[in-house]
Amino acid sequence: MNPALIVALGARYAFSRRSSLSFISLVAVSGLVLSVAVLVVVVSVVNGFERELERRVFGVLPHLTVYGRSPLARSPGDVDALAGIRGVVGVAPIVQGAGLAAVADQVAGITILGIEPDSYPAVSDYERYLTGGRLEPGAFQVVLGAGVAQRLDVAIGDDVTLVLPAATVTPAGLFPRQKRFRVSGILRSRSEVDGRAAYVHLSDAARLFRLGERIHGYQLRLDDLFAADAVAGAAVSRLGRERVTARSWMRTHGNLYRAIGVQKSTMFVLLSFLVAVAAFNLVSTLVMVVNQRSGDVAILRTLGAGSATVVGAFVLLGLLLGGTGIALGALLGTLIALGLPALYAWVSRSLELDLMNQYFVTYLPVEVRPDDLTGIVAVALLLAVASTLYPAWRAATLAPSRILAHE
């Protein structure tokens, strides 16, 4: 007996307008559609946050910083040694320190970073988010993060005073070391960097920190974020442990990155239970098919259909119902996910809401990944197949003589 014939017969009864199973079948399929769609949307949103964290935060921040235990003399040999480490794609000298930015009675804590505009793009994408001109040596210009500029209420062309936590001894007493800078640009990366960044030219930073021709260290960009610890060990070994120490992104933002990964896995597992509940609705649907059409199954058995044929037919019928719901759910979830950022932006503007102000981005990031879609569909199909086994076994164990005796 051809299993396709039994599948067609079962589908006819399951979806026939005259069949009492049509509503239950539609409910089972609809449950799969909604649960798969929800899983696709949630995983896509988590993917979006992971992507923005990597692009914006790790695109602006260094992957690895090598600090001198004391200020280092600039050496092309050190740059070549670091650039020669496997996995390093960029090296740039820096001068870095904590300080304050002050304008009138407004004060903001900042991280002062001295950079060379020509070499720094090799380790940071900060120019992508920069509004204004490039830093010029000797001009005492500063690029402020958007959050710092907002707190100080300054714009491009205004003056700010950078103050270091170091005192200068004068005949009048101790005074904090400070210098007035002109704001030449604003950094709007829409990440936490905006709340504390203050970029100045490397030569101006060296004068401010009184380093002469020395620097504090080097920032490195890697082709693999997760190789940071291994590269850090190699960098320290090449430059000498007595001279330098290294600090990777894993020490500063590793917990946040891992938290997003754990959250994605957790949400996938939890929402998979939702898919499982919807998939096991197929059990009740197929059991009712068996109960209400047991006579038809008995007739097919008397015509020569074996147990394996009946089991295979009901498994295929379950896959027909489940596959339809899963495919529609994946399609619906993808469409919702792709349209969610625009919908969120419209709702935020219409209702004047700022629901994302506690995150490192101010909009809703979404990324639909084909590998995640494949995983979701595979898991849902596996659950759907598992849901068909009991009804199929029950149909295969029906006794044709006992059933036909009551027909």
Image (tube, rainbow, N blue to C red):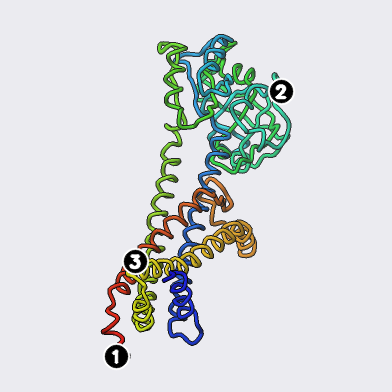
In the rendered view, would you say 310 is above or below 82?
A: below
Query: How far apart are the alpha carbons under marks 2 and 1?
Result: 96 Å
Of helix, strand and loop, which one carries label 3?
helix
In the rendered view, would you say 379 is above or below 4?
A: above
Amino acid type shown at disc 1? His
Amino acid type shown at disc 2? Glu
Residue depicted at x 43% and y 60%? 381
Residue placed under numbered mark 1 in the picture: 406
Residue depicted at x 30% and y 81%? 400
Q: How many marks?
A: 3
Query: Percent x, y for residue 62?
Result: 53, 29
Can I make out residue 26 in this image? no
In the rendered view, would you say 285 is above or below 312?
A: below
In the rendered structure, the answer to whether residue 133 lies left or right of residue 338 reads: right
Residue placed under numbered mark 3 in the picture: 308
Mark 1 residue crowding within 10 angstroms, few (<14) / some (14–19) / many (20+): few
Instruction: Tell me the quarter of the picture where residue 178 sits.
Output: top right
Query: How far apart are the alpha carbons under marks 3 and 1?
Result: 25 Å
Of helix, strand and loop, which one carries label 1?
loop
Instruction: Tell me the quarter of the picture where residue 180 sits.
Output: top right
Label 2 or label 1, whichever lies nearer to me, is 1
In the rendered structure, the answer to whether residue 11 lies left or right of residue 306 reads: right
Residue depicted at x 48% and y 56%? 42
Of helix, strand and loop, which one carries label 2?
loop
Can I make out residue 282 in this image? yes
Query: Percent x, y for residue 208?
Result: 59, 19
Numbered circle sitting on residue 136: 2
